[in-house]
């Protein structure tokens, strides 16, 4: 299958300013995603969708292509990721005559991304004829025993019916690993959904997953990265 990697990277991150190019262990954060995409050998090209001149320069210096400036209507805090990916695919089709069978949306903040995971996802997409493949990881604690804090400041169970249910009797649950999404483009452009009906999971261990939205997330990611690389050196 002809495939393209699309890395969305807007410049207006508020909780972590310039998050996508902020230095993470000596590299701009986006470099981890670009390098993994290029090393995988899976893609005809690696595209970065951005509205920011600094991100554009860094991405191009690293070997990605930035064929357009992302419209401001697709660069605010409320823009859905699916809309950004669809815009990129339609631009490539309408302006460059490129019609890809598969696309991989790779997040710009994915320092734990593995080339092997990208390859496994591609194989799942092609071998299983899946409309999408989403990396997931398991919750560390049964979500059905989750607690919330009421307006009065007291703790309450979200699902009180499971107060006496044994953990072993509850189903294992998973969440999005926040690294990449493999998409069969025909289905995606029709439905505009990353979690397409029939999407397949690619399970990744919890120690290689960290969403990065806040400074606390960033600091935790640093600790995980330092721990992983210290272990490799032993």
Image (cartoon, grey):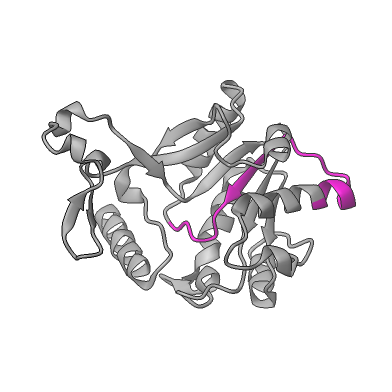
**Magenta includes 110?**
yes
Residue 84 lies, in percent from the top left, at 67, 55
Q: Is residue 222 left or right of residue 181?
A: left
Q: Is residue 157 left or right of residue 75?
A: left
Quarter holding residue 102: top right
Report the number of numbered marks. 0
Q: Is residue 189 above or below residue 150?
A: above
Residue 134 lies, in percent from the top left, at 50, 38
Q: Nearer the viewer, residue 112 or 191?
A: 191
Residue 37 lies, in percent from the top left, at 59, 50
Furthest residue in direction front, as rendered: 152
Quarter holding residue 67: bottom right
Point 68% across, 37% down: residue: 191
The magenta stretch is: 91-111
Q: Is residue 8 left or right of residue 101?
A: left
Q: Is residue 207 above or below residue 204?
A: below
Q: Is residue 114 above or below residue 110?
A: above
Point 65% across, 66% down: residue: 59
Point 47% across, 56% down: residue: 110
Furthest residue in direction top, as rendered: 128
| Picture quarter with the N terminus | top right
Q: Nearer the viewer, residue 78 or 115?
A: 78
| Picture quarter with the C terminus | bottom left
Residue 126 lies, in percent from the top left, at 61, 26
Point 41% across, 40% down: residue: 136
């Amino acid at each position: 299958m002809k495939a393209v990697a699309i890395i969305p990277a807007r410049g207006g991150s508020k909780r972590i300013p310039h998050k996508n190019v902020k230095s993470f262990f000596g590299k701009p954060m986006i470099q981890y995603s670009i390098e993994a995409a290029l090393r995988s050998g899976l893609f005809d090209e690696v595209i970065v969708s951005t509205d920011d001149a600094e991100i554009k320069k860094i991405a191009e210096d690293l070997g990605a292509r930035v064929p357009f400036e992302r419209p401001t209507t697709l660069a605010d805090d409320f823009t859905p990721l699916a809309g950004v990916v669809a815009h990129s695919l339609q631009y490539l089709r309408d302006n460059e005559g490129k019609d890809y069978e598969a696309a991989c949306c790779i997040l710009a903040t994915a320092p734990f991304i593995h080339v092997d995971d990208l390859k496994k996802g591609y194989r799942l997409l092609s071998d299983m004829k899946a409309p999408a493949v989403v990396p997931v990881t398991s919750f560390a604690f049964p979500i059905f025993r989750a607690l919330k804090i009421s307006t009065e400041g007291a703790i309450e169970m979200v699902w009180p019916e499971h107060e006496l249910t044994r953990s072993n009797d509850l189903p294992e649950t998973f969440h999005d690993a926040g690294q990449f999404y493999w998409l069969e483009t025909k289905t995606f452009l029709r439905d505009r959904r990353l979690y397409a009906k029939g999407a397949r999971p690619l399970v990744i261990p919890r120690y290689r997953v960290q969403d990065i939205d806040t400074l606390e997330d960033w600091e935790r990611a640093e600790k995980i990265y330092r721990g992983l690389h210290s272990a490799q050196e032993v």
